[in-house]
Image (cartoon, rainbow, N blue to C red):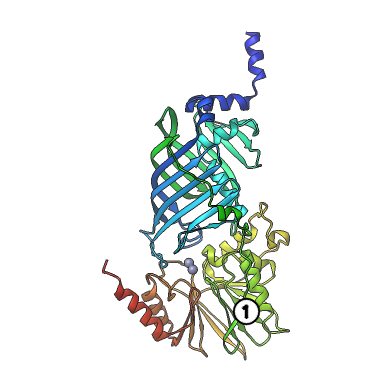
Amino acid sequence: MLAALAACSQTPPETKLLQQAADAMGGAAKIQAAKTLVIEGEGLAGNLGQNVLPESKLQNWEVTEYKRSTDLAGGRYALQMVRTAKTFPFAPGAVQRQNQGLDGDVAYNVGGPQNAATRASAMVARDRRLEALHHPLTAVRAALDPTSKVTGFHSEGLLQVVNVETAKGDMFTLAVDLTTHLPTAVRSTAYNANLGDVVIQTVFADYADAGGFKLPTHLQTKQDKDIAFDLKVSSNKVDADVGDLAAPADVVAGEEPPMYPVYDIKPVQIAKGIWLLPASHNSVVFEFKDHLTLLEAPLNESRGLAVIAAAKALVPGKPLTTLIVTHHHFDHTGGLRAAVAEGLTIIADRNMEGFIDQMTARPHTIVQDALAKSPKPAKIDSVEDQKMLKDDAMEVRLYHVNNLEHSGSMLMVFVPSEGLLINADLYGPGFATFPAWDTMLKNIADRGIKVEKHLPIHGTLQTAKEAADTVAAKTAAKPAG
Ligand SMILES: [Zn+2]
Ligand SMILES: [Zn+2]
């Protein structure tokens, strides 16, 4: 008995946990010898950062044709899926095919008209390396690797937990069931441009036999509290032929892009005291008597800082004091923290108040953005139903958009002197469908304004007739249903 106790005490609890987990799944030797893993299935992907109101439930993409082929020894994977917006309107097109790859430190995406592979940033590669570990086979395999450090054994209720750090420095937490010893979850942290530090956790369930292994057939991944992905596995194959998963040579040879693009902003004056800063998400600058106001700091911190700098340079001696945000969706608020860091007052819909406070306060330690380096609270000027910004030089009216399915925090922006309406996501000439067109017309009518020109945040300046013709032509070209 003493000998047994001594033997026991000589096995660190971390090692014992891994041995038991490996045994439960099919054995350490088999796990270490496995070469490939192919997972197929379908499920749901949460439309993160695009809910109707900041606190409302996420809408889901339906995911089909999901296939992840992993070269376990080579540190490579290819992930394909089709996601379809069935339950919410999505103007750029309801069906999207996604094709992503990882080859060691090289992440890339395949797509576009040429179906070309484009290299992604080191942050994307980091995210994908960790994402690849959110599976019992890859996680336990990585933990068994002698170059990994496994520490911090502890219990959490009916789970036993260890921390794993790979030779690359990637860190994750592995939880196993106290009774079955099967892995129940992997947890790691990631950086989100809007949310800062987030916890990504995948829970594994419904284990089934697959080629001598026990592997989960249900994987649910959460980003903080939100369900980001829910996958029902139809097929788990170990050591199937996955072909060559190496990244294309030109992608490997190509330069690694920075986390965010570097933006070259070319302002275009579209009326007296009004400039367009064009991009996939336009920004607009308004010149008032003694200050400038910016509309939209979209996409990410880099774009936010770039449009702020471009706005500041437009009229010498006139300070930029204010940012108007159209709505809370993440692609339209990626530069919000940068604006707060710059001390701008944020004008936004009343339904964004809590959201702005939260965005401002969240920790950004994985990447220190401008606000993390110089923390300050947001100065918020909320729009209840409408707000008029007016002095001798400029008049801009902000209206809450009523009965909009896309977002409950939406403002539309009207410049009476020009008959100019600026909208985000209600209408853009490049949209494939126009689910919010009628809602926009109704809001225009209800506000009693006369719109002569449209400047969509997504698109170019058009007359009201051109916009209506665009909608009519594209709608007519589509078969019914
Ligand atoms: Zn939106
Ligand atoms: Zn948008």
Which residue is located at x 61 percent, y 77 percent?
A: 294
Q: Indicate left or right for 452 with 359 as reference.
A: left
Q: How many marks?
A: 1
Quarter placement of the C terminus? bottom left
Given the image, on which type of amino acid does mark 1 rest? Thr
- Reading the image, the residue beneath label 1 is 293
* Residue in the image at 43% along x and 88% along y: 450
Q: Is residue 131 left or right of residue 216?
A: right
Q: Quick check: can you spot residue 296?
A: yes
**Front residue (pair 222, 275):** 275
Where is residue 186? Give x, y as percent. Answer: 54, 39
Please provide percent x and percent y for residue 211.
Answer: 41, 30
* Residue 356 % position (x, y): 59, 64
Q: Position of residue 214 (x, y in %)?
A: 44, 30
Which residue is farthest front?
249
Residue drawn at x 51%, y 64% is 329
